[in-house]
Structures are given as C-alpha cells and as structure tokens.
Amino acid sequence: MTVSVALAGCTGSIGRQTVEVVAADPDRYRIDAVSVGSSVADAVQVVASTGARVLAVADEAARFAARDMLNDAGMVRVEVVDDLAPVCSEVDVVVNAVVGFAGLDITVATLAAGRRLALANKESLIAAGPVVQPLRATPGAELIPVDSEHSALHQCLRSGTPGAGEVERLILTASGGPFRGRTLDELSQVRRQDALAHPTWAMGPKITVDSSTLMNKGLEVIEAHELFAVPYDCIDVVVHPQSVVHSMVEFTDASTIAQLSMPDMRLPIAYALAWPQRGGTPFGRIDWATVGSLTFERPDRDTFRCLDLAIAAGRMGGDAPAVLSAANEVAVEAFLDGHLGWAAISDVVSRVLDAHDVAVPGTVGDVIDADRRGRIAATAVVAQMAA
C-alpha cells in the first residue's frame, strides 16, 4: 500500500530532502499535498516533480501568483488553498518541516486528526507542550521525531525495549557548531557568514545559527523531555564533532545503546515515513574502514549560554519555553539582519526570560499570546541594544 504524505514547508532543507526520500522509493510513498509561505516558484517546481494535488500558500499575494504559475504550466488540476491543516486528516503521514513557531497549527491539526506526525518543527512541541501533549492520546495519533538526535533516541529506545524505570539517561550529542573551542572574546566580531558555516550539517539559516549558539541543543533537551517523559536531571549533552553518533540511551545497568550513521537528514526522514518499519534506502551508510576516530567532550556552557538558558526555561515549564523560543527567533533574525552581534543573542534571551512571569497555557490561543509577548519583549531589548 502506498503511503500518502502531506509536506508542510516543502521548499526548506527538510522539505527538499523529504522529496528526495519519496523519489527514492516511489512505489512506497507519494506526496499528495505541500505547503509554502511565499516561495511559490520553488513550490510549483515541487508540485510538478511530485504530482501533489494540493498546494497551500500562506501569503495571499503569493497564492494568486501560484495559481497563475500553475495555469501557465498546464497544472490546472492542482488546488491552491491558504492552509494545509484541513488536508492533514486526508493523508497517512504529515511531515512538519515548517521553521519556527509557525509550524504549531500543523502539529495540532495532524495529531487531532489521529494521523502520524513526522516532526521536524521542534518549536511547536517545545512552545506548546502543555497543549500538544494531550493530543498525542488521540486514537491513531503518532509523533515520530525527525531531528537526527531525537530520531536516534527513538531508535535506541526501540532497540532497547526498556521496561519501566530501566532508562538511566538520555545523552544528546552536539557537533559543537562552527565555533567549537573559541572563547567569547574570539566570538565578539563573528559575522553572519561565519555562523552559517556549519562543519557537518546543511541546514536553514535559523537552525544553523541556533547550532552555533547551542540554543538548538537546549531546545532539543526540552523536546527530549516532552517526547520521552524523561526528567531534565536525566538528560545530558556531550559535544561530538564528527556527528556520527547521533544520540545515546544509557540504561540502569550502565549498558548504552547508540545510533550511528553518517550525517544525512534523509535517514531520520525515511525512518519517520516508514515507521514502524524501516526505510529501504541506505542513507548515511558508514564505511567503517575510513570513519576514523569518534571523540566526545563537555560543552562550554560559559561561552555558549543559550544551552543552559533553554534548559532553565524547560525547568520553569508553563509558557516559559514558548517565550524563550519567541525571543530567540527575534534575536537570531536581528543577528542575520546585521542588527545584533552573535554574542548578544543569549543576552536578549536572558533578559526576556528574567522578566517573564510564568503562566500555564491551556489553549493554542494562550501559546500564541505567550509567543506574541515574547516577541514584543525581545524586540524591545534588541532596540535598546542597537540604540
């Protein structure tokens, strides 16, 4: 039976690689619907290559342009809509590859419809954990992580089939990003292009900057807590520059199971699409004769403050992770636009968190409001720093 797929965020890094995974096994998967924010020229190419029947375009002006492009190309059968969420109930798997908080609607719609969610959009789970968690109990709903680290943990837990109380620690690995080993003084003048030069992964700008500050790893700690219900005290981070060991699970008898592959996001994408089976294409295969040494070290928490800021927000709970995520998005955007220094990203997030009074969100509207307040507060802090 062919697995039908809806792909939210089809033109980003994960979206493009999802198209490659499907193309590698066309008898097993088909893409029925895709979404995009405003990059409609690229989205129309995705529609043409996949045969998708629905294209959702968030931007109104871009939506009209997409209709014209599809008509000009003779693809009049394609339905152009404003929102992918209603389509989530019509497919087997939804890949949420939207960047940032904007992916929340797709996460909620997919789980509420009782469908499998292949989640690459960590912010929606992190920011809206109290709202998303109950939806995971919807009959038929499945949440399979696409982040390489959480996919690795999922695979390790699957392989270990632990009983109650048998998991001692989850160990997330971090590449260390482009600035591993450098001091704050050395990082005071880094530029956009420096932060975007990731040594092992090809990712979008926002996620790549998050990797350089270790905010990405802090968000992943929160995500691991939400996904696997493991206490924060039992989640560790180690720096592993080779990015071959993607994460590990240590059990109470000190036995540790790790998932290894060469850095290739197509592997965790294929894993989420094929669940509970395995994919058939060997993405990320290791040549064991040439892989070389695998090394591990502790993260520099003094230089890369975002790691502990994220964990602190996770421990605070409630809407604190939503505020953290929003403040970080604003700070990263300001850095990418040249309005803020790299080292100031953590300063913005810290000041916003320090001033925040935690509340427990009960609805998606509460999460959206927390996100809004976090963005307002962060924008004000950035303006003060830039003045």
Image (cartoon, helix red, strand yellow):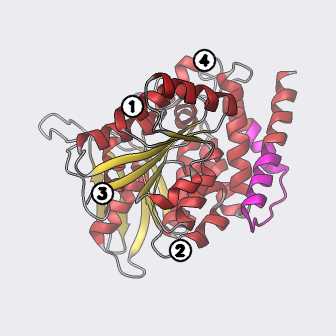
**Where's residue 140, x and y in %?**
45, 72
Helix, strand or loop status at disc 1: helix
Label 2 vs 4, first from the N-terminus: 2
- Which numbered marker is on residue 48? 1
Q: Are marks 4 and 1 in contact (CB under 8 Å)?
A: no
C-alpha distance separating marks 4 and 3: 40 Å
Residue 259 rendering spot, x and y as whole percentages: 29, 54
Is the residue under label 1 in contact with that under label 3 (CB below 8 Å)?
no
- Cα separation between marks 4 and 1: 37 Å
Q: Earlier in the sequence, mark 3 or mark 2?
A: 2
Check disc 2 and report its element: helix, strand or loop.
loop
Q: Is residue 171 above or below residue 177?
A: below
Residue to which mark 3 is pinned: 274
Q: Is residue 235 left or right of residue 358?
A: left
The residue that disc 4 covers is 191
- Closer to viewer: mark 4 or mark 1: 1
Residue 340, quarter of picture: top right
Drawn side of residue 45 relative to residue 160, left or right: right
Q: Amino acid at mark 2?
A: Thr
Q: Nearer the viewer, residue 10 or 168?
A: 10
Which corner quadrant of the image does residue 291 belong to? top left
Distance Cα–Cα, label 2 vs label 1: 34 Å
Q: Residue furthest left?
A: 289
